[in-house]
Amino acid sequence: MPGPKDLDPASSPRAMIGSELRHARERKGLKQTELGQILFVSGSFIGQLEAGARRMQPEYARMLDEELDTGDYFARNCAATAKSKYPEHFAEAAEAEAQAISIKEYSPLLIPGLLQTPAYARAVFRAYLPTEPEQQLDELVSVRTDRAVLLDDPTDLVLWVVVDEAALRRVTGGRAVMAEAVRHVADAARRHRAIVQVLPFDTGAHTAMEGPIRLMDFADAPPMVYFEGVGTGRLEDDPSTVRARQRTFELLAACALSPAKSLVLLDEVAQDYAHEKHP
C-alpha cells in the first residue's frame, strides 16, 4: 500500500497543519489509531486531519500540543482554519468536498449544489432568506456556484448524483429558471462532468426516503458521509455508518433510471418548462 502523499503546506492552512500533524505523530512513533485513542477519536479521524479533509478544532489542538510536545503550534494555527466563507454547519463539509476524489450524492428536494445555476441558487436562497439584502444574496450565490470549479477537470473528482424527480418538478424561481437549471444538469451529464441518474416518481418507496445522502472518498483518508438538515449538518466517519449509507446509495442507484434514460427525461423536463407544459 502506498504511503501518504506529502501535502503542500502552501496550498491551505489545513494542508499545512495536517502535514505538521503527520510529521509530529511519526516523530513520536505513534500510529493514527494510537493517537486517536489518546484524543478519544478514531484513527480515521486522525487520518482525515492529516489529509486536510477535516478541520482541526481548538480542543483537539490543545491536546495534540500536549501529547506531541509541539508547544502551542496547533493551538495557534488552528484558528486560521476556522475562517470560512460557508455557513457554519456546512463549512467543514465544503472543505472536505474540495479534497475528495469522488462524491456520491442523492438529492430528494433540490438540484445538487455543484450542479446549480446562479438563477436557481438565488431562488433557493431567497426562499430560505426572504428578507436578506440583495448584496448578501449575491455573495451566497457566488460562494455556491464557485464550488462548481471542482468539475472543471473530471479526472480530479468523480461526481455521481441521483436526483429525485421531485427536485426537477418543483418550480423554483419560475419556469424559465427551471428550464435553464435542468438543461444545465443535462449538459453536465452530456459533457461527462457528472454521472447523473434520475429517480422517477413511479419508483415508489425506496431506501433513502428519510433524506439526502452525500458520501465522499479521499485519496489519503477514510471515506465520510455528510448528514444535512434544515440549518444543520455533520460529518460522520464511523466505518459501519459509512458502509450503511454506501449500501443505501447503491440500492438507490439500482432503482433509478440509467444515465442514458435519465438524460432523455432531463431533456423532456427542460422542454416542458421552456414550452410551459410542466404538469
Image: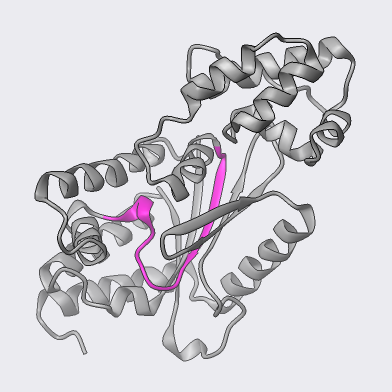
Give left or right: position of 70 versus 195: right
Residue 12 vs 208, above or below: the answer is above
Q: Residue at x 47, y 30 (%)?
A: 82
How far from the left and from the top, in percent, is residue 89?
46, 50
Q: In which quadrant is the N terminus drawn?
A: top right
Q: Is residue 103 magenta?
A: yes
Residue toward you, 260 or 140: 140
Residue toward you, 209 or 183: 209
Give left or right: position of 168 versus 9: left
State the extent of the magenta-drawn residues as a range. 100-116
Q: Residue at x 83, y 28 (%)?
A: 35
How far from the left and from the top, in percent, is residue 44?
76, 39
How far from the left and from the top, in percent, is residue 142?
23, 42
Picture quarter containing residue 154? top left
Give left or right: position of 270 versus 240: left
Residue 133 vs 79, above or below: the answer is below
Q: Which residue is drawn at 12% across and 51% down?
A: 133
Q: In which quadrant is the C terminus drawn?
A: bottom left
Q: Is residue 258 magenta?
A: no
Picture quarter containing residue 180? bottom left
Q: Residue at x 81, y 34 (%)?
A: 36
Residue toward you, 14 or 244: 14
Give left or right: position of 69 versus 212: right
